[in-house]
Image (cartoon, grey):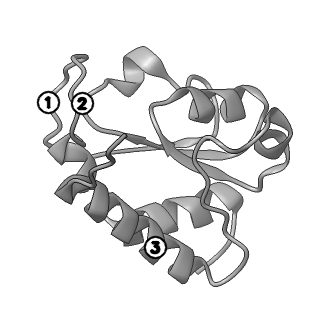
């Protein structure tokens, strides 16, 4: 099996690294290796419109949801204090593509970091 890393995947990894660096404390970056227990005890989850994000929200974990082409009004989170970030020019589509949608890459690291602080009630 051959694994290829695309330019958009590298950009995502760079942004994740920036967020962890800004946090300055025990941020955990994990994909596909967490149990339901981890989602339940996390201080906050940051994620795209995915199953793990919605699972964490259902468990009551504070969340910052990153949306690109899918519509948060359609997919949630609903009726929570969670924060949704979406690029202003994102065009709604529910089609699947192999690459990261460009609108996801428009969400900037400082914006995500500030949203996490707001969600957790931490002042700047």
- 16 lies above or below 81: below
Q: Position of residue 35 (x, y in %)?
A: 79, 38
Whether 31 is drawn above or below 121: the answer is above
Which mark is nearer the camera, 2 or 3?
3
- Tell me the number on the disc at residue 17: 3
Q: Is residue 65 among the parts visible in the rendering?
A: yes
Please tell me in which quadrant of the rendered image residue 36 appears. top right
Residue identifier under label 1: 91
Q: Is residue 74 left or right of residue 103?
A: right
Q: What's the CA distance linking mark 1 and mark 3? A: 27 Å
Between label 1 and label 3, give the one nearer the viewer: 3
Q: CA distance from mark 2 to mark 1?
A: 6 Å
Residue 34, image quadrant: top right
Quarter of the image containing the C terminus? Answer: bottom right
Q: Are marks 2 and 3 in contact (CB under 8 Å)?
A: no
Residue 78 relative to residue 91: left or right: right
Q: Write the residue at 80% across / 45% down.
A: 38
Q: Are marks 2 and 1 in contact (CB under 8 Å)?
A: yes
Q: How many neighbours does mark 3 have within 10 angstroms: few (below 14), some (14-19), or many (20 or more)?
A: some
Pick whichever, 92 or 40, lies toward us.
Answer: 40
Q: Is residue 73 above or below residue 117?
A: above
């Amino acid at each position: 099996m051959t694994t290829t890393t695309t330019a958009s995947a590298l950009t995502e990894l760079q942004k994740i690294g920036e967020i962890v660096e800004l946090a300055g404390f025990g941020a955990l970056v994990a994909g596909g290796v967490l149990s339901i227990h981890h989602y339940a005890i996390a201080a906050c989850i940051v994620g795209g419109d995915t199953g793990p994000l919605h699972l964490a929200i259902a468990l009551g974990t504070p969340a910052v949801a990153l949306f690109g082409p899918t519509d948060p009004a359609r997919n949630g989170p609903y009726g929570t204090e969670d924060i949704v970030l979406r690029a202003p020019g994102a065009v709604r589509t529910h089609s699947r593509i192999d690459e990261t949608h460009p609108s996801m890459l428009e969400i900037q690291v400082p914006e995500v970091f500030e949203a996490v602080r707001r969600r957790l009630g931490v002042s700047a």
